[in-house]
Amino acid sequence: MRKIILSVILITILILTFISNFILIENPIPTESVKFDTGDTAWMIVATALVLIMTPGLGFFYGGMVGKKNVISTMLQSFMAMVIVTILWVIIAYGLSFGPSIGGFIGNPLPNLFFQGVKTNTAHSLAPTIPLMLFALFQAKFAIITPALITGAFAERIRFWAYLLFMLFFIIIVYAPLCHMTWHPDGIFFKMGVLDFAGGTVVHMSAGWAALAGAIFLGKRKVQKVNPARITYVLLGTGLLWFGWFGFNAGSAMGANGLAVQALGTTTVAAASAAMAWVFLDKIVGHKLSAMGACIGAVVGLVAITPAAGFVSIPSAMFIGIFSSIVSNLMVSKFPKGKIDDALDVFSCHGVGGMTGMLLTGVFASKAVNPAVINQGLVFGETTLFIHQLIALIIVSVFAFTMSYFLFFIVNKITPLRVSEDKEELGLDISQHGEYL
């Protein structure tokens, strides 16, 4: 049955892409009349590549943490996100995210099916100095990494084909609406004045709550405590994530400008501050200063600064990094691991880190840093922004967790989510892919 379904999907996509050459006719691209800023365009091409490299970086980060029997499967889950989400984004998800607004909740995908109208001679209102296609491809990389982040929660026990099906549903039903509400000019959060510079709600909170839903639904692993397969992979993955995060945050300025530089500065300061705070706190409570702790701390800082990167000062970024690291560290240590098996602490790091960053954006956002800020943070004596950030946090949390749990339920009805005990014991590398280190 699976072979038949996959064959039908491939043939259908092949036919539709062929037909689209005749029915989705676009105007020829003029060679001289359209003028974009070449510096902005060059930077955004680089930023798009930087964001993409985060996903294989995440694969190394997660792959080094799991047991040796599950390294390939864990890394492949991130790699396949690049494959599946790219195709899905071009066919329909871009339109759902950035197409004409339907009530401020979702986009109308019909005008942009198969990237219809996504050209190199037009621009999006949010990025007027670069081609629309570049904007769309940059946004695709955010969609790619989001389901990849979730995989750390149900590592070492999910069937690979079930994961692919969940990823498809998640992008359409969870990610696209959140992206539209937050970043589309007609989205409800955007109109509320909610600030999310590069994905605190859209990426990290949605992934964190989906991860918690997945950990609860799939249940505990047979063996929860495993030795990390390759801590060197974790270090490598952290380096790639930190490197790529400059595209993630500084790229969200949509140009080679002062705001991009500000976001780059806040990003690297927050990451360094969080890594320092994590290892210091570990030492304070009696643990050894570990490479794993330093890496996790850096990633938490990167997560927390993401919504605030283009809205806060360097000292504020340092505070956000340290504070979020302490909160996530305590959350990891207090998380009920015996009851909920979030294998790689995705909720405690990405979910909690994203929520912390969203709220602290409402504390430190400044017009002096970004004149586009309408309502400043609490430290400037204004409360409106913080309240709006809190409202968005609650809505996103309920929506992302509820819908993700529902999607796990639906996928499990279509095909079992969890591998059998003997395949879990054998390891997913062999049982799912017939490969091993």
Image (spheres, rainbow, N blue to C red):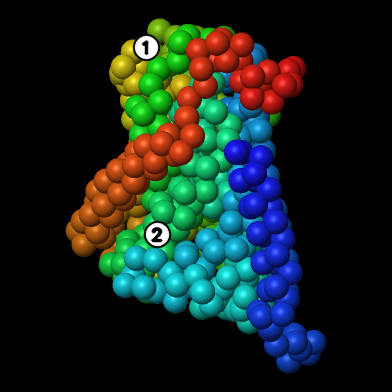
Residue type at tag 2: Pro
Residue under numbered circle 2:
177
Relative depth, front residue between 236 and 281: 236
Q: Residue at x 80, y 87 (%)?
A: 31
Q: Residue at x 55, y 15 (%)?
A: 424
Q: Position of residue 276 (x, y in %)?
A: 49, 27
Q: Residue at x 56, y 45 (%)?
A: 145
Q: Position of residue 390 (x, y in %)?
A: 24, 51
Q: Disc number at residue 381? A: none
From what the image shows, is residue 142 above or below residue 254? Answer: above
Q: Position of residue 236 (x, y in %)?
A: 68, 29
Q: Is residue 327 visible?
A: yes
Place residue 251 in its image quadrant: bottom right
Q: Position of residue 185 (x, y in %)?
A: 41, 73
Residue type at tag 1: Val
Q: Is residue 266 visible?
A: no
Tell me: 312 left or right of 292.
Answer: left
Instruction: Categorize mark 1 by other alpha carbons within 10 Å: few (<14), some (14-19), many (20+).
Output: few
Q: Disc number at residue 285? A: 1
Q: Residue at x 65, y 52 (%)?
A: 8
